[in-house]
């Protein structure tokens, strides 16, 4: 019997033994007699990720207080992904706590021409969200009043404490430096600290990593984040949803980030099981 990748043990040896008790099997070219596998009661088990929707309900139960999503923008290329996620969250009435890393000001300047300033963040954010990935105006219904901005150097900010209520955190885009910092628990700025807090509080953390190619170091950090319960969503657009424009590709990635967080949206067309469905639908429109 050959064990496929999806059958391999993750960090749940008990389940592995239950399923494969007594088989001789091939693992990476080695023959393994699984009847000799033993459960280590001290083996780490993966924390059960809490569904974002369920968590939001728990947090909101009987409360009227503001419970935001934290959006951390780090210095990877891909500021249009962050803009699309922010617009979509605000469009569905969510509140947002925004953290923009120092390095991401460079990518924002490079990709949009906008200088993001702490003292004028509301104006700069409004200008950023009003533009699509091609720099042209996009439909945006507003909701900036539901954004609270925290400076990346402000380690006394609300999201740096687990007692500050949030629904979870989306890091979009996530640099390899941010991935490393969160995986290692460095907390070198508010973005990394807030992500660490999100993990320790067992709240949803979505990490939209953007880098290519990926070295082994980053891959190991991503596995660590996955083990800790984060959802890693590579910023890799798909083409089955009938994209005709750069913004469609951006919205696909943003939509997958929101899917991972359990936030509703209409950013892309979902797969419906029909090959060629996207082009057929386009022809009918
Ligand atoms: C224009 C530009 C594009 C960059 N693109 C990426 C990228 O796609 N992925 C990445 O991991 N780092 C990228 N970097 C490097 C990060 O900005 C750098 O590693 C930084 O230390 C990240 O810090 P932060 O995680 O605190 O934002 C880019 C830098 C610049 C100036």
Image: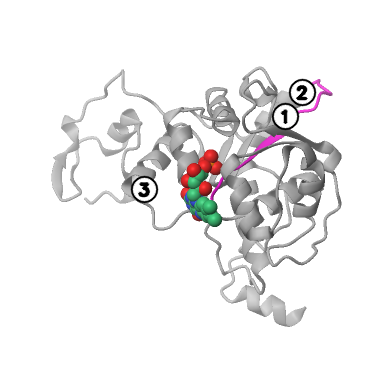
User: Residue 138 vs residue 78: left or right?
Assistant: right
**Residue under circle 3?**
6
Q: Disc 1 and disc 2: Cα gap in Å?
A: 6 Å
For label 1, the residue is 57
Identify the mark nearer the N-term, 3 or 1. Answer: 3
Q: CA distance from mark 3 to mark 2?
A: 37 Å
Residue placed most toward the observer, 60 or 219: 219
Helix, strand or loop at label 1? It is helix
- x, y percentage for residue 7? 33, 45
Name which quarter of the figure residue 227 lies in: top left
Question: Is 75 part of what is drawn in magenta?
Answer: yes
In magenta, the rendered stretch is 61-76
Asked if labels 2 and 1 touch by Cβ distance under 8 angstroms, the answer is yes
Q: Residue at x 62, y 36 (%)?
A: 169
Q: Nearer the viewer, residue 225 or 149?
A: 149
**Residue 124 position (above or below residue 97):** below
Secondary structure under the numbered disc 3 in the rendered image: helix
Left or right: 139 in relation to 77:
right
Q: What secondary structure is the stretch in magenta mostly built from? A: loop
Residue depicted at x 61% and y 23%:
155
Asked if residue 175 can be seen in this view, the reply is: no
Say which quarter of the image contains residue 148: top right
Question: Would residue 183 be found to the left or right of residue 40 on screen?
Answer: right
Residue labelled with disc 2: 61
Residue 88, above or below 137:
above
Specify the quadrant that holds the C terminus.
Answer: bottom right
Q: Is 38 one of the magenta-colored residues?
A: no
For disc 3, the neighbor class at 10 Å (few under 14, some 14 to 19, many from 20) is few
Q: Residue furthest toward the bottom?
A: 283
Image coordinates for residue 106, horizontal then vertical, percent: 60, 50
């Amino acid at each position: 019997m050959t064990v496929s990748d999806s059958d391999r043990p993750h960090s749940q040896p008990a389940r592995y033994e239950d399923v494969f008790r007594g088989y001789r099997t091939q693992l990476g070219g080695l023959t393994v007699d699984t009847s000799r596998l033993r459960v280590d009661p001290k083996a780490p088990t993966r924390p059960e990720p809490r569904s974002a929707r369920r968590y939001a309900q728990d947090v909101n139960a009987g409360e009227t207080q503001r419970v935001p999503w934290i959006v951390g923008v780090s210095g990877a290329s891909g500021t249009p992904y962050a803009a699309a996620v922010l617009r979509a969250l605000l469009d569905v009435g969510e509140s947002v706590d925004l953290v923009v890393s120092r390095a991401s000001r460079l990518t924002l300047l490079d990709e949009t021409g906008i200088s993001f300033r702490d003292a004028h963040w509301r104006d700069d954010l409004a200008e950023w969200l009003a533009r699509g990935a091609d720099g042209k105006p996009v439909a945006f219904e507003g909701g900036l009043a539901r954004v609270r901005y925290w400076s990346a150097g402000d380690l006394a900010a609300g999201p740096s404490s687990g007692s500050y209520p949030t629904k979870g955190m989306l890091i979009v885009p996530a640099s390899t430096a941010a991935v490393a910092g969160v995986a290692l628990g460095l907390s070198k700025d508010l973005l990394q600290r807030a992500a660490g807090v999100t993990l320790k509080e067992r709240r949803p953390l979505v990490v939209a990593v953007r880098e290519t190619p990926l070295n082994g170091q980053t891959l190991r950090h991503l596995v660590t984040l996955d083990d800790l319960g984060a959802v890693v969503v590579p910023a890799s657009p798909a083409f089955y949803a009938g994209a005709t424009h750069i913004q469609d590709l951006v919205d696909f990635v943003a939509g997958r980030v929101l899917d991972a967080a359990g936030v509703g949206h209409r950013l892309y067309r979902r797969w419906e099981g029909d090959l060629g469905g996207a082009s057929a639908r386009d022809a009918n429109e």
